[in-house]
Amino acid sequence: VAPPLTVVGCYAHPDDETWSVSGSMALLAARGVRCAVWTATRGEAGQITPATGVPPERLGEVREAEERAALALVGVHEVEFGDFRDGAVADADQAELVRAIGSFLRRLRPDVVVTMERGGNTGHPDHMAVSRATEVAFTAYLAEGPDGERPREPRLYQEGVPRSKLAQLRGLATQVGLEFPDEDQPYAPKSAPDELFSCHVDVSSVAELRLRALLEHRTQLAVGTYQLVVSHPEEVRWWLGTESYIRIHPAPRPAERPEASLIEAFAP
Ligand SMILES: [Zn+2]
Protein backbone atom coordinates (compact mmCIF):
# COMPACT_ATOMS: atom_id res chain seq x y z
CA VAL A 1 0.00 0.00 0.00
CA ALA A 2 1.44 3.37 -1.03
CA PRO A 3 1.83 5.94 1.77
CA PRO A 4 -0.76 8.76 1.80
CA LEU A 5 -0.17 11.69 -0.52
CA THR A 6 1.76 14.44 1.22
CA VAL A 7 1.81 18.12 0.25
CA VAL A 8 4.13 20.57 2.01
CA GLY A 9 4.69 24.32 1.84
CA CYS A 10 8.00 26.11 2.51
CA TYR A 11 7.75 29.79 3.40
CA ALA A 12 9.63 32.63 5.08
CA HIS A 13 7.14 34.19 7.53
CA PRO A 14 4.00 33.27 9.45
CA ASP A 15 1.07 34.25 7.16
CA ASP A 16 2.92 33.68 3.84
CA GLU A 17 1.33 30.23 3.74
CA THR A 18 -2.16 31.57 4.48
CA TRP A 19 -1.99 34.02 1.58
CA SER A 20 -0.40 31.41 -0.65
CA VAL A 21 -1.63 27.84 -0.24
CA SER A 22 -4.30 27.76 2.49
CA GLY A 23 -7.22 27.19 0.09
CA SER A 24 -5.55 24.27 -1.66
CA MET A 25 -4.52 22.76 1.65
CA ALA A 26 -8.05 23.14 3.04
CA LEU A 27 -9.42 21.15 0.08
CA LEU A 28 -6.64 18.55 0.21
CA ALA A 29 -6.68 18.03 3.98
CA ALA A 30 -10.43 17.42 3.76
CA ARG A 31 -9.67 14.66 1.21
CA GLY A 32 -7.22 12.97 3.58
CA VAL A 33 -4.04 14.34 2.00
CA ARG A 34 -1.35 14.92 4.58
CA CYS A 35 -0.42 18.63 4.58
CA ALA A 36 2.43 20.34 6.44
CA VAL A 37 4.11 23.74 6.45
CA TRP A 38 7.68 24.82 7.23
CA THR A 39 8.36 28.48 8.00
CA ALA A 40 11.92 29.83 8.15
CA THR A 41 11.24 32.56 10.75
CA ARG A 42 8.67 33.53 13.36
CA GLY A 43 8.10 36.93 11.78
CA GLU A 44 9.47 38.65 14.87
CA ALA A 45 10.59 41.78 12.99
CA GLY A 46 7.20 42.44 11.39
CA GLN A 47 4.80 45.29 11.97
CA ILE A 48 2.36 45.11 14.87
CA THR A 49 -1.23 46.26 14.64
CA PRO A 50 -1.35 48.68 17.61
CA ALA A 51 -4.76 47.52 18.87
CA THR A 52 -3.32 44.08 19.67
CA GLY A 53 -1.01 45.55 22.31
CA VAL A 54 1.63 42.92 21.57
CA PRO A 55 5.09 44.10 22.69
CA PRO A 56 7.81 43.71 20.04
CA GLU A 57 9.76 41.18 22.12
CA ARG A 58 6.76 38.83 22.10
CA LEU A 59 5.90 39.19 18.40
CA GLY A 60 7.71 36.00 17.33
CA GLU A 61 5.81 33.72 19.71
CA VAL A 62 2.50 35.45 18.99
CA ARG A 63 2.96 35.11 15.23
CA GLU A 64 3.91 31.45 15.57
CA ALA A 65 0.63 30.92 17.44
CA GLU A 66 -1.26 32.93 14.78
CA GLU A 67 0.12 30.71 12.01
CA ARG A 68 -0.75 27.54 13.92
CA ALA A 69 -4.30 28.84 14.51
CA ALA A 70 -4.75 29.87 10.86
CA LEU A 71 -3.55 26.49 9.60
CA ALA A 72 -5.63 24.57 12.15
CA LEU A 73 -8.71 26.28 10.66
CA VAL A 74 -7.92 24.78 7.25
CA GLY A 75 -7.12 21.38 8.76
CA VAL A 76 -3.32 21.55 8.76
CA HIS A 77 -1.72 20.58 12.06
CA GLU A 78 1.87 19.79 11.11
CA VAL A 79 3.67 23.11 11.36
CA GLU A 80 7.41 23.55 11.81
CA PHE A 81 9.58 26.61 12.24
CA GLY A 82 13.20 27.24 11.34
CA ASP A 83 15.40 29.43 13.47
CA PHE A 84 16.24 32.02 10.86
CA ARG A 85 16.00 35.71 11.68
CA ASP A 86 13.08 37.64 10.23
CA GLY A 87 14.36 40.14 7.68
CA ALA A 88 17.77 38.45 7.48
CA VAL A 89 17.03 35.15 5.73
CA ALA A 90 18.84 36.29 2.58
CA ASP A 91 21.89 37.21 4.67
CA ALA A 92 22.00 33.87 6.48
CA ASP A 93 24.26 31.03 5.36
CA GLN A 94 22.31 29.86 2.29
CA ALA A 95 23.73 26.34 2.54
CA GLU A 96 22.25 26.15 6.01
CA LEU A 97 18.88 27.33 4.68
CA VAL A 98 18.98 24.62 2.01
CA ARG A 99 19.94 22.04 4.66
CA ALA A 100 17.05 23.06 6.92
CA ILE A 101 14.52 22.77 4.07
CA GLY A 102 16.15 19.56 2.86
CA SER A 103 15.87 17.94 6.26
CA PHE A 104 12.18 18.93 6.42
CA LEU A 105 11.62 17.33 2.99
CA ARG A 106 13.45 14.15 3.93
CA ARG A 107 11.40 13.77 7.11
CA LEU A 108 8.01 14.48 5.50
CA ARG A 109 8.73 12.70 2.16
CA PRO A 110 6.25 14.94 0.27
CA ASP A 111 4.83 14.19 -3.16
CA VAL A 112 4.23 17.90 -3.75
CA VAL A 113 6.34 20.84 -2.56
CA VAL A 114 5.03 24.40 -2.77
CA THR A 115 6.83 27.69 -2.23
CA MET A 116 6.51 31.25 -3.57
CA GLU A 117 7.44 32.17 -7.12
CA ARG A 118 11.02 33.33 -7.70
CA GLY A 119 10.14 37.02 -7.36
CA GLY A 120 8.86 36.33 -3.84
CA ASN A 121 5.36 37.76 -4.51
CA THR A 122 6.40 41.07 -2.97
CA GLY A 123 10.09 41.07 -3.78
CA HIS A 124 10.83 40.54 -0.07
CA PRO A 125 14.43 39.20 0.12
CA ASP A 126 13.35 36.59 2.72
CA HIS A 127 10.67 35.27 0.33
CA MET A 128 13.11 35.13 -2.58
CA ALA A 129 15.75 33.37 -0.47
CA VAL A 130 13.30 30.67 0.67
CA SER A 131 11.99 30.23 -2.89
CA ARG A 132 15.55 29.74 -4.20
CA ALA A 133 16.62 27.46 -1.35
CA THR A 134 13.48 25.35 -1.77
CA GLU A 135 14.35 24.79 -5.44
CA VAL A 136 17.87 23.69 -4.50
CA ALA A 137 16.67 21.43 -1.67
CA PHE A 138 13.96 19.98 -3.93
CA THR A 139 16.50 19.11 -6.64
CA ALA A 140 18.57 17.12 -4.11
CA TYR A 141 15.42 15.47 -2.71
CA LEU A 142 14.31 14.53 -6.24
CA ALA A 143 17.73 13.07 -7.02
CA GLU A 144 17.39 10.62 -4.12
CA GLY A 145 14.97 8.73 -6.35
CA PRO A 146 11.85 6.79 -5.45
CA ASP A 147 11.69 4.34 -2.57
CA GLY A 148 9.06 2.59 -0.46
CA GLU A 149 8.26 5.74 1.48
CA ARG A 150 8.13 7.91 -1.59
CA PRO A 151 7.15 5.79 -4.54
CA ARG A 152 5.98 8.72 -6.67
CA GLU A 153 8.19 11.30 -8.36
CA PRO A 154 7.76 14.55 -6.39
CA ARG A 155 6.57 17.76 -8.00
CA LEU A 156 7.53 21.37 -7.27
CA TYR A 157 5.10 24.27 -7.58
CA GLN A 158 5.57 27.99 -6.98
CA GLU A 159 2.56 30.04 -5.98
CA GLY A 160 2.16 33.52 -7.44
CA VAL A 161 -0.25 36.14 -8.67
CA PRO A 162 -1.05 36.25 -12.40
CA ARG A 163 -0.70 39.76 -13.82
CA SER A 164 -4.37 39.93 -14.85
CA LYS A 165 -5.51 39.00 -11.34
CA LEU A 166 -3.37 41.65 -9.67
CA ALA A 167 -4.78 44.24 -12.07
CA GLN A 168 -8.28 43.26 -10.94
CA LEU A 169 -7.30 43.61 -7.28
CA ARG A 170 -5.77 47.01 -7.98
CA GLY A 171 -9.03 48.02 -9.63
CA LEU A 172 -11.00 46.93 -6.59
CA ALA A 173 -8.69 48.77 -4.17
CA THR A 174 -8.95 51.94 -6.22
CA GLN A 175 -12.72 51.59 -6.39
CA VAL A 176 -13.06 51.37 -2.60
CA GLY A 177 -10.58 54.21 -2.07
CA LEU A 178 -7.66 52.20 -0.67
CA GLU A 179 -4.16 52.98 -1.73
CA PHE A 180 -2.55 50.15 -3.70
CA PRO A 181 1.15 50.59 -4.37
CA ASP A 182 2.62 50.12 -7.84
CA GLU A 183 4.51 46.88 -8.38
CA ASP A 184 7.87 48.66 -8.37
CA GLN A 185 7.37 49.96 -4.80
CA PRO A 186 9.20 48.09 -2.00
CA TYR A 187 7.14 45.15 -0.67
CA ALA A 188 4.21 45.93 -2.94
CA PRO A 189 2.28 42.88 -4.20
CA LYS A 190 3.91 41.77 -7.43
CA SER A 191 2.57 39.65 -10.25
CA ALA A 192 4.04 37.21 -12.74
CA PRO A 193 3.07 36.84 -16.42
CA ASP A 194 -0.19 34.89 -16.83
CA GLU A 195 1.40 32.43 -19.27
CA LEU A 196 3.80 31.10 -16.59
CA PHE A 197 0.93 29.66 -14.56
CA SER A 198 0.19 26.01 -15.19
CA CYS A 199 -2.17 25.26 -12.32
CA HIS A 200 -5.26 27.19 -11.22
CA VAL A 201 -7.14 25.81 -8.24
CA ASP A 202 -10.76 26.80 -7.68
CA VAL A 203 -10.88 27.25 -3.91
CA SER A 204 -14.10 29.28 -3.88
CA SER A 205 -15.80 26.67 -1.68
CA VAL A 206 -13.26 27.46 1.06
CA ALA A 207 -12.83 31.19 0.37
CA GLU A 208 -14.70 32.02 3.58
CA LEU A 209 -12.38 29.69 5.53
CA ARG A 210 -9.35 31.37 3.92
CA LEU A 211 -10.73 34.74 4.95
CA ARG A 212 -11.09 33.54 8.54
CA ALA A 213 -7.59 32.05 8.45
CA LEU A 214 -6.17 35.39 7.31
CA LEU A 215 -7.99 37.15 10.15
CA GLU A 216 -6.15 34.87 12.62
CA HIS A 217 -3.04 36.93 11.87
CA ARG A 218 -4.28 39.62 14.23
CA THR A 219 -0.95 41.41 14.61
CA GLN A 220 -0.84 41.97 10.83
CA LEU A 221 -4.32 43.26 10.08
CA ALA A 222 -3.28 46.91 9.66
CA VAL A 223 -0.65 45.97 7.10
CA GLY A 224 -0.93 46.20 3.30
CA THR A 225 -3.47 43.98 1.57
CA TYR A 226 -4.94 42.90 4.93
CA GLN A 227 -6.67 46.29 5.07
CA LEU A 228 -8.64 45.37 1.98
CA VAL A 229 -9.58 41.97 3.45
CA VAL A 230 -10.69 43.50 6.75
CA SER A 231 -12.62 46.41 5.27
CA HIS A 232 -14.15 44.69 2.20
CA PRO A 233 -14.46 40.97 2.93
CA GLU A 234 -17.33 40.50 0.45
CA GLU A 235 -15.50 42.21 -2.38
CA VAL A 236 -12.26 40.22 -1.94
CA ARG A 237 -13.98 36.84 -1.84
CA TRP A 238 -13.40 36.25 -5.57
CA TRP A 239 -9.70 37.03 -5.00
CA LEU A 240 -9.53 34.41 -2.26
CA GLY A 241 -11.45 31.96 -4.45
CA THR A 242 -8.54 30.96 -6.69
CA GLU A 243 -4.91 30.03 -6.15
CA SER A 244 -2.46 29.96 -9.04
CA TYR A 245 0.76 28.00 -9.33
CA ILE A 246 3.73 27.74 -11.66
CA ARG A 247 4.90 24.16 -11.98
CA ILE A 248 8.67 23.97 -11.89
CA HIS A 249 9.06 20.20 -11.86
CA PRO A 250 8.21 18.54 -14.06
CA ALA A 251 8.18 21.54 -16.42
CA PRO A 252 4.90 21.80 -18.34
CA ARG A 253 4.88 20.32 -21.81
CA PRO A 254 4.15 22.70 -24.70
CA ALA A 255 0.41 23.44 -24.89
CA GLU A 256 -0.25 21.34 -21.79
CA ARG A 257 -3.73 21.89 -20.38
CA PRO A 258 -3.54 23.78 -17.04
CA GLU A 259 -3.98 21.64 -13.94
CA ALA A 260 -6.85 22.27 -11.55
CA SER A 261 -5.28 20.77 -8.42
CA LEU A 262 -1.86 20.33 -6.85
CA ILE A 263 -2.38 16.55 -6.80
CA GLU A 264 -3.96 16.17 -10.22
CA ALA A 265 -1.06 14.01 -11.41
CA PHE A 266 -1.61 11.57 -8.55
CA ALA A 267 -5.35 11.62 -7.95
CA PRO A 268 -7.19 13.03 -10.97
ZN1 LIG B 1 6.31 37.15 4.18
Image: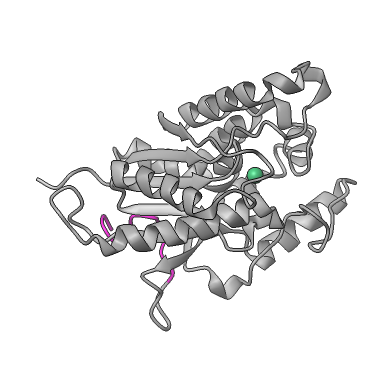
Instruction: Report whether 220 appears left or right of 200.
Output: right
**Residue closer to the observer: 115 or 201:** 115
Q: In which quarter of the image is ligand 1?
A: top right
In this view, the residue farthest toward the left is 1
- Residue 55: which quarter of the image? top right
Q: Is 139 rendered above or below residue 224?
A: below
In the image, is 151 to the left or to the right of 267? left
Seen at 77% across and 33% down, the residue is: 47
Residue 58 picture location, percent across and down: 68, 19
Residue 216 at x, y percent in the picture: 62, 26
* Quadrant showing the C terminus: bottom left
Of residues 80 and 170, the one drawn nearer to the viewer in this rendering: 80
Specify the principal SS of the magenta part. Answer: loop
Provide the residue span drawn in magenta.
Answer: 258-268
The number of numbered discs placed on residues in the rendered structure image is 0
Q: Quadrant of residue 17?
A: top right
Residue depicted at x 79% and y 26%: 49
Q: Identify the residue at image location x=81%, y=19%.
A: 51
Indicate the quadrant containing the N terminus: top left, top right, bottom left or bottom right. Answer: top left
- Magenta includes 267? yes
